[in-house]
Amino acid sequence: MKRRDWFRVAAGGALAAVARGQEALPEHPRDLVFPKLVYDPPDPAAHRHELDAGAVAYLVEDHQLPLVTVSVTLRAGSYQLPPESAGLASFTGSQMRSGGAGARSARDFDEEAAFLATNLGSSMGSTSAQASVNCLAQNLDASLGMFFDMLKAPGFDAERLEIARSRALQGLARRNDRLDGILGREFSRLLRGRHFTTVQTTQASIQAISRESMQQFHKRSFDPARMFFSVSGDFDTQDMIRRLNEALAEGWPSAQDDPGGIPAPSHEPVPGVFVVDKSSRDVNQSHVRLGHIGIQRDHPDAFKVRIMNSVLGGGGFTSRIMTRVRSDEGLAYSAYSRYQPGTYYPGTFSAGFQSRNATCAQAAAILIEEIRRMQEGKVTPQELDTAKNYQVEIFPRFFATAGQIAGTFASDEFTGRPKDYWKTYRERIGDVSADDVLDAAQTHLHPDKLVILVVGARDAVLAGNPDRPEFRFESLAGDPGIRAIPLPDPVTMEYPEA
């Protein structure tokens, strides 16, 4: 039952009991007593099926609407490619859909999809490739035929490739225009160094992409045995299994490479204050982000860290950082912290905001102060309850629809999440204590190892607020001082000397 539906039922039951005279009418709505929310997650084993080709499929029937959605994920991505091939993975993923498939030209493929009212999509990122089809149940045969043609035999139309290439090349020149884009790119470089996650496309790498290179990368990547399907909608499970088995039985490229493991970064971040100067008359605010390397998803303290970060800055308006920076000081519209455990290697902790140039140093000092305060004393019972209740109450959202159920379980198996993760989720959240939160902060927050990045009007930011001269980035930089990061050439991504 969805949470809003439970609330209507519970409220209706409470008011009905009052109407029947079984309970006294409360003086205020806050005095209404609701039954405890009880929700048990679905069992993944009930929806899991192994297909003949070695693929795994999670199937969840839903007959409310005559629609069917089929999605597939497999291990492939830019992590398999050298830096000079940057862009090949994303082009291959997008052009599988755009460039026609099987016996259909790109134009015919588009027209048939439109005639069937079928949506098809494909993409490829750094560590995975995805494709999906959403169609009317009555058009399932034709739509699945198009879907598997797209997966097995993409046409990679030459004209569509040139259109995509032209758009990508035009976009290169604008890479240094947006402050938030610069912030994300340079912060990742500071934390990860030279890694497949930080490699950028260049004019040369985009020009090197050809129809043949996409065909070769597709051939080495799309192996049915490595596929994870999620299927939801108006279908019969046994019939869908038959359809999937037939589609995966033949016609696939024969030469398949072992995708290999995901390489972890070897870079050791250097703490300090770094500034990217992006000055103009229009830039009266600057972006600031600070952080360090975090933990991996399967770390024993993962749930403690989640609650800790919710109190610190991940809990929106109830978090300490938002309260201090926005509500108390009025320095930024939004301020946050994120502790994102990594799936294949340790993730990152980060906190940030956007503020007026003169007040950036003050806001940054507040963030660091709140990080240290998390390590100096226990959170209050109210803070702990708010953080834990939020994590428990959002839990049913992962399974609100048939598509979410199938997608969640397929994603979990693809990334190797423990099978009992959701079954024990609320128990592990409930077990987190104030002592656990303090221990997590003292163990997994490192205020002395922070990489602090400022992107904006350098001179105005470093000048600070004359009314609050005690807040300056120089005092946060320490002995190395403030280090400049020059903007690279947006087309070649070559950096001049700082």
Image (cartoon, helix red, strand yellow):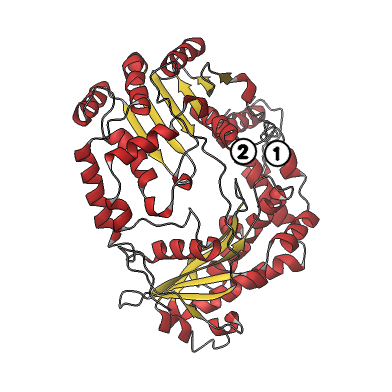
Marks 2 and 1 in Cβ contact (< 8 Å): yes
Which image quarter is the C terminus in?
bottom left
Horizontal side of 41 relative to 380 (left or right) equals left
Residue type beneath disc 2: Phe
Residue 36 spot, x, y in % from top left: 70, 34
Q: Secondary structure at mark 2?
A: helix
Q: Which mark is residue 426?
A: 1
Around disc 1, counting alpha carbons within 10 Å, would you say few (fewer than 14), some (14 to 19), or many (20 or more)?
A: some
At which x and y percent is residue 467?
51, 88
Mark 2 vs 1, N-terminal side:
2
Q: Position of residue 131 (x, y in %)?
A: 40, 32
In the picture provided, is 72 more to the left or to the right than 346? left
Location of residue 440 by image quarter: bottom right
Residues packed near mark 2 inside 10 Å, few (<14), some (14 to 19) or many (20 plus): some
Visible in this render: residue 86?
no
- In this view of the protein, which residue sits in the foreground, 171 or 362? 171
User: Quarter of the image holding residue 31?
Assistant: top right
Closer to the camera, 128 or 238?
128
- Image position, residue 242 (x, y; %): 47, 11
Amino acid type shown at disc 1: Arg
Mark 2 sits on what residue? 395
Q: Quadrant of residue 321?
A: bottom right
Q: Quadrant of the N terminus?
A: top right
- Up/down of 114 relative to 481, above or below: above
Q: Residue furthest right?
A: 435
Name the residue: 72% across, 61% down.
Answer: 441
Residue 196 is at least partly visible in this image: yes
Name above or below for residue 278 compared with residue 99: below
